[in-house]
Image (spheres, coloured by chain):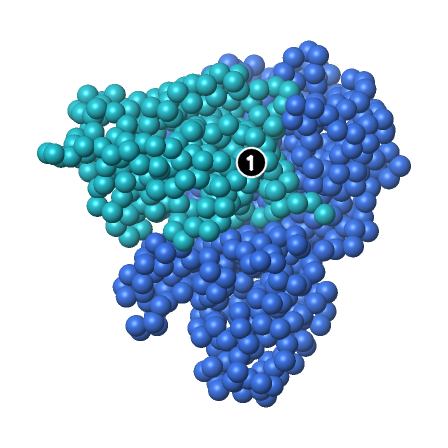
Chain colours: A cyan, B blue
Amino acid sequence: MRSKQSQLEAQSIEIIREAVATSSNPVMMYSVGKDSSVMLHLARKAFWPAPPPFPLLHVDTTWKFREMIAFRDLMANESGMELRVHINHAAQKEGISPFVHGSERYTDRMKTEGLKQALDAGGYDLIFGGARRDEEKSRAKERIFSFRAPGHRWDPKAQRPELWNLYNTRINTGETIRVFPLSNWTEADIWQYIASENIPIVPLYFAAERPVVKRGDKWIMVDDERFPLNAGESPEMRLVRFRTLGCYPLTAAQESNADTLEKIIEETLAASSSEREGRLIDHDGAGSMERKKQEGYF
Amino acid sequence: MLDALRFITCGSVDDGKSTLIGRLLYESKQIFEDHYQELERASGKYGTQGKELDLALLVDGLQAEREQGITIDVAYRFFSTENRKFIVADTPGHEQYTRNMATGASTADLAVLLIDARKGLLTQTKRHSRIVSMLGVRHIVVAVNKMDMIGWDESAFNAIVTDIHALVENFGFASVQAIPMSALTGDNVAFHCEKAPWYTGPSLLEYLESVDVSKPEAFQPFRMPVQYVNRPNSEFRGYCGCVASGSINVGDSIRVVPGGAEAKVKSVVIWQGEQPTANTGDAVTITLDREVDVSRGQVLSSVDDPIEISDQFEASILCLSEQHLVPGRPYLIKLHTAQVGVTISNIKFKLDINQGSHLAASTLELNDIGEVTLYTNLPVAFESYKQCKTLGAFILIDRMTNETVAAGMINFALRRASNVHWQSVEINKAARATLKSQKPACIWFTGLSGSGKSTIANLLEKRLFVAGQHTYLLDGDNVRHGLNRDLGFTEADRVENIRRVAEVAKLMVDAGLIVIVSFISPFRAEREFARSLFQEGEFVEVFVDTPLTECEARDVKGLYAKARQGKIANFTGLSSPYEQPDSPEIQLNTLNCSPDQCVQTILSEVIKQQ
């Protein structure tokens, strides 16, 4: 009997190969998080001994944790793949910041708009993303091969039927397909796989003393000097880790002493809140993720 | 611990599918605190349970679903107990979303079929049980829900169980388990119901935790469809794929099908190493001991029991599109990793969902289930769906819109293509064309009735004739008096009309002629089919672009007047669509150009081609 893990792995490798075999200009979104790490690892497995025959694309919002950027460059180098980095320079010039403009407007400009710019500039017809169905309700509804109309729009009411492992990858000019090889993985599957395959991940996932301040009921890390401290406020050192990674002002840390993979897995299995709770943008009003996705966000 | 269980919930609208999944997530403690708080908020806003939590909102993740209180698309949820992991697909109950239900069912090991105890078996119950059986789901749980609404009435439950057994008697399920329950209160979902002491069977969760869905593996010859050829440099050439059945060892011989080349397995490559064997379900890269021609869509197969090939099949299909499936129309078929042209040659019958009886049909419409014969334009390797799902399941894709129009399962091949050979002839098209000193071509006029096709086509033939060219004009009206006099004007007949004319034009081009075809030919798909019969540059599509108002004003044959009076059904432009060409070789505007000028435009294009 095959283990659930090897079934998941084989299914994901099949998806990645199918996507590459039927597209002309594929690219893999690389967001540096644990899911990206697993997806990249699976892609390398799928095409070994060759490196994966497509570039990695990172939409840099300029507000990522510094450790993420260092890790990103390291992994691109190790995998032998080309890394393409895109920044929405227009928004950067306007000084768009999550602290000043609010998470919704910031995400729209630096992430969604930046992503669309990068995809249009690259002319990619197929884009790998690391999203999982267990993350959020509207993601649970998405196909593995998710069709996008020109302008990157997702129409949740008109998704292509997706039976068996037969993916309809045909598109016309201007249309694209987003492919989610990790659709059927859960957060626990990801961690167990990282442990059993020894997959490198950003150290921020492990508990360590880090400088944080309290905002609302959440701990936010002061990753650089751009963090606007309130009068009299100073960062305190706490033993924290991140369950999910994004832009540092929008990603809450949790107090934890899980400094090994074994402890992280134990903590994940016992968790009483979802991992995306630490993501501030998911809470911008009901159905916010679905709306962002319709507009082109991953 | 047993394998992870993949199951779906199905049944009619409002039978409580989403509520049941919400309940399973809730009872198995899979709801995170922040999701729970969100659920409390949403229940107040959209909930259908008054002040109570509406568990369906945990699953109905789309805004439109929450607002309308229905499930539109399949949602995949994950939960686990101490004994098993589960992937559950919550599928919609509305008939219009049947294709989303089929999407969920195609990968399920088990189906939980919900029935509202107050309503009994409904049309959708029957449709869904038929679809899950057709897709090869071998186990069903009949969840008789809302038992609390009828006071846990044992005789009502028994009556439904009798009905369901009568319905599924011939569906070939390996097990059918009926459970009385209430998803709303949770009784018999995770814990036993005290209000129904007469039921002594397992609760739903107990049953799902223990049911054995593994299948005795009777079918074991090695088969691996080639997905991708990995050729990073001249030293390495590997064939990537997932093993669909059986296993293979390094040193074993394999045959490449279709094709027939044989070679020995040199290595089974995996991440940073090699392994001695590839087993069913493994995603591997295989290298061979000699150079053979292998590409995506071929199947690496055992030599002792090689996979068969054919180009004609009998299959069961489910129509997934609002476009009708029409015999004669060209589609693409995706069967494992192969993708080739395909045509439905005949609809054997359409299934009556309620009675299970067979109905005659000339087309299949959205959500219809039927049995058809198909022929592909190239032979492909296959197994019957019963024998091996991976090698017998397929989808049909529209060539123009790229929509997935049907899902199907091969029942058997109608003939073995290996016995069929083209008669090779020594006097060929080139020889015949040389004798006539011309380049054969098919000039295909399309446009509305009264647009001026025949006038221009006639004039064109005269000009060519005078210039010493060998021509023939096929005109819509004339052909319908002879070759196609058995055809009417329904969509299916129009498709066949064009198919025959295209084939005749092809024979004439083969004979070395310049063939002028003047047909309304309203559908893009058929014109593309006609084009596909000819070599590059041989087919010239001429779109006679006269606006409908102008055609109707001219009304040379008085047909528009009759159609307006309702005396002609399916009249193109009025009661039947005309699909304009996207990129015809020539587009003629008859409002600004005389027939002479139009012919001149065509001649200069044809001469350019010569």
Residue B334, visible in the rendered structure? no
Q: Residue furthest right?
A: B304
Judge whether A51 appears above or below A180 on screen: above
**Residue B330 left/right relative to B77:** right
Question: Which residue appears at 59% of the width and 22% of the height?
Answer: B536
Pointer 1 residue: A195
Crowd band around label 1 with a 10 angstrom C-alpha radius: few (<14), some (14–19), many (20+): some
Q: How many marks?
A: 1
The relative height of residue B363 versus residue A92 in the rendered view (above or below) is below
Q: Name the one closer to the observer, A99 or B449.
A: A99
Q: Single out the residue that lies furthest toward the left.
A: A231
Residue drawn 54% across the image and 43% down it: A189
Q: Is residue B55 visible?
A: yes
At horizontal 65% and vertical 26% (from top left) the residue drawn is B271
Q: Residue furthest top?
A: B234
Mark 1 lies on a secondary structure that is helix
Q: Which residue type does callout 1 highlight?
A: Ala
| Residue B350, position as x, y percentages in the image | 63, 61
Position in image of residue B323 (x %, y %):
50, 50
Residue A240, how many percent across, how many down? 35, 37
Quarter that holds the C terminus of chain A: top left
Q: Position of residue B128 (x, y in %)?
A: 57, 64
Q: Nearer the viewer, residue B395 or A184?
A: A184
Q: Is residue A131 left or right of residue B391?
A: left
Quarter location, residue B368: bottom right
Which chain contains the residue that carries disc 1? Answer: A
Quadrant of the image occupied by residue B341: top right
Tell me the residue at 48%/72% (across/down): B186
Answer left or right for B138 relative to B184.
right
- In this view, A198 is above or below B375: above
